[in-house]
Amino acid sequence: MNTRFALALVGLLWAAVGPLDAGAQELPAVTGAKPYTTTQLVKILRQAGYVDIAAESADQIHFKRSGQIFYLNRYEDGDLVLYFGLTGYDHLRESDFNAWNREKRLTRAYLDSDGDAVLESDMLFDGGLTARKIAVWVNVFVGLVDGFENFLSARDAANQSSAPAAPSPRASSL
């Protein structure tokens, strides 16, 4: 292909498609999509088989699975966050949470301000969600919790066994 022909082809494509810089053109806004209400989210959770569902406030719902409590937080812009917290792990380190976050997708784990283990996941509203997508997202998150608990238990036990032993008391030589 000669150079003139190639340049002419690129010019025609550019004229037809426009610049390739995504920031150069504003994408059209999605219209008509509204964030889910708390009432609608409760219905989605109920249809997905969750129990003991209650709206804690206009923006927070809690629900249970196998005795475990989960929280679904709704933001004004329609974004959603799932939250699950665990207590009783006294030997976890930041490196344990870094390992989880490095190895796993779709969640983030951290120690909260009280030193409790937390697992969260975000769902961006981004102009619209379907009830099915929300239900699948919740199911995936809930399914990851057992693995999270097993991971924490193993890390907590390993950290406890590798902790330096407390010095043994010495008899006084008085």
Image: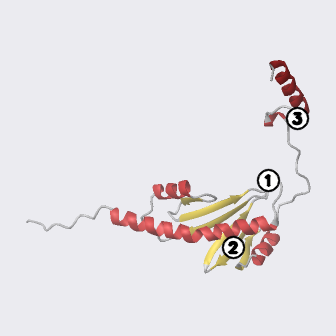
Residue 118 at x, y percent in the picture:
57, 64
107 relative to 168 in the view: left or right: right
Of mark 2 and mark 1, the one earlier in the sequence is: 2
Is residue 133 at least partly visible in the picture? yes
Specify the amino acid type for callout 2.
His
Is residue 86 at least partly visible in the picture? no
Residue behind mark 1 = 126
Q: Which colour scheme is used?
A: secondary structure
Q: Is mark 2 on a helix, strand or loop?
A: strand
Q: Is mark 3 on a helix, strand or loop?
A: helix
For the residues labelled 3 and 2, the Cα–Cα distance comes to: 48 Å
89 relative to 69 in the view: left or right: left
- Mark 2 closeness class: few <14, some 14–19, many ≥20 residues within 10 Å: many
Residue behind mark 2 = 62
Q: Which of marks 1 and 3 is in front?
A: 3
Of mark 3 and mark 2, the one earlier in the sequence is: 3
Q: Quadrant of residue 62?
A: bottom right
Marks 3 and 2 in Cβ contact (< 8 Å) = no
For the residues labelled 2 and 1, the Cα–Cα distance comes to: 23 Å
Q: Which of marks 2 and 1 is in front?
A: 1
